[in-house]
């Protein structure tokens, strides 16, 4: 199933010249419900390796590169440029462009214990913040790398559900 083949069309005056043209209605969106997203029965987990694309993951997991849209939908990814894990060079370039000093302190972390529980408190790197001696400095690079690590762990809808998901997608995208 080609992703946009199931979308309805609309008539739109693209050039503002009064001539209506038939276009695919790309404004339609179908997403996995929160209930389904929380269900461990319907998903497997996959760790994206640097440089792997949604198409690569779909081919490897489903043996169908055309199901890249399902990989994205299962993870509620709309923009692969900002929400998909970056390759090594892309990440390095991104961090360098975002921060004047990639090794500068982004924030501090302090572990606090309460009874049997311990939790990490993030303390901003601001002059008004009192930083405990035991706090650990986290660099801008480390902070961004952690965000990438979170993006690397994705959910994949198990193959046995794909046929039903495709039917449901087609039904919902048409507004039925």
Image: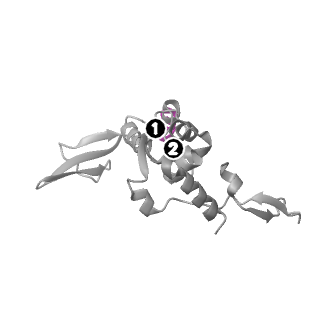
Indicate whether 113 appears above or below 137: below
The structure residue drawn at horizontal position 55% and vertical position 36%, both measured from the top left corner, is 56
The structure residue drawn at horizontal position 31% and vertical position 40%, both measured from the top left corner, is 138
The image shows residue 154 at horizontal and vertical percentages of: 44, 45
The image shows residue 161 at horizontal and vertical percentages of: 50, 52
Neighbor class of circle 1 (other Cα within 10 Å; few <14, some 14-19, many 20+) is: some
Assess whether residue 64 is covered by the magenta stretch: no
The image shows residue 107 at horizontal and vertical percentages of: 32, 46
The image shows residue 152 at horizontal and vertical percentages of: 43, 41
* Residue positioned most to the top: 89
Residue position marked by numbered label 1 in the rendering: 48
Assess whether residue 98 is covered by the magenta stretch: yes
Judge left or right: residue 25 versus residue 75: right
Residue position marked by numbered label 2 in the rendering: 84
**In what element is the residue under mark 1?**
loop
Q: Distance between the residues labelled 2 and 1?
A: 9 Å
Q: Do the residues labelled 2 and 1 touch (CB within 8 Å)?
A: yes
The structure residue drawn at horizontal position 38% and vertical position 53%, both measured from the top left corner, is 40
Main SS class of the magenta portion in the image: helix
Dividing the image into 4 quarters, which one contains the C terminus? bottom right
Magenta span covers which residues?
92-99
Q: Which of marks 2 and 1 is nearer the N terminus?
A: 1
Can residue 68 be seen from the camera position used here? yes
The structure residue drawn at horizontal position 56% and vertical position 45%, both measured from the top left corner, is 80
Q: Nearest to the eye among marks 2 and 1: give it.
A: 1
In this orientation, which residue lies closer to the viewer: 66 or 128?
A: 66
């Amino acid at each position: 199933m080609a992703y946009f083949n199931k979308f309805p069309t609309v008539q739109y005056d693209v050039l503002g010249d009064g001539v209506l043209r038939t276009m695919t209605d790309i404004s339609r969106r179908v997403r996995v419900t929160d209930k389904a997203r929380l269900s461990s029965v319907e998903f497997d987990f996959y760790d994206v390796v640097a440089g792997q694309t949604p198409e690569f993951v779909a081919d490897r997991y489903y043996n169908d590169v055309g199901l890249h849209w399902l990989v994205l939908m299962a993870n509620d990814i709309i923009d692969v440029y900002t929400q998909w894990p970056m390759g090594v060079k892309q990440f390095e370039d991104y961090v360098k462009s975002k921060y004047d000093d990639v090794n500068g302190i982004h924030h501090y972390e302090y572990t606090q214990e309460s009874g049997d529980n311990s939790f990490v408190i993030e303390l901003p790197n601001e002059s008004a913040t009192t930083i405990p001696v035991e706090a650990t400095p986290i660099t801008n690079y480390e902070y961004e790398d952690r965000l990438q690590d979170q993006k690397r762990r994705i959910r994949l809808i198990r193959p046995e559900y794909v046929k039903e998901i495709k039917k449901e997608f087609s039904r919902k995208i048409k507004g039925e």
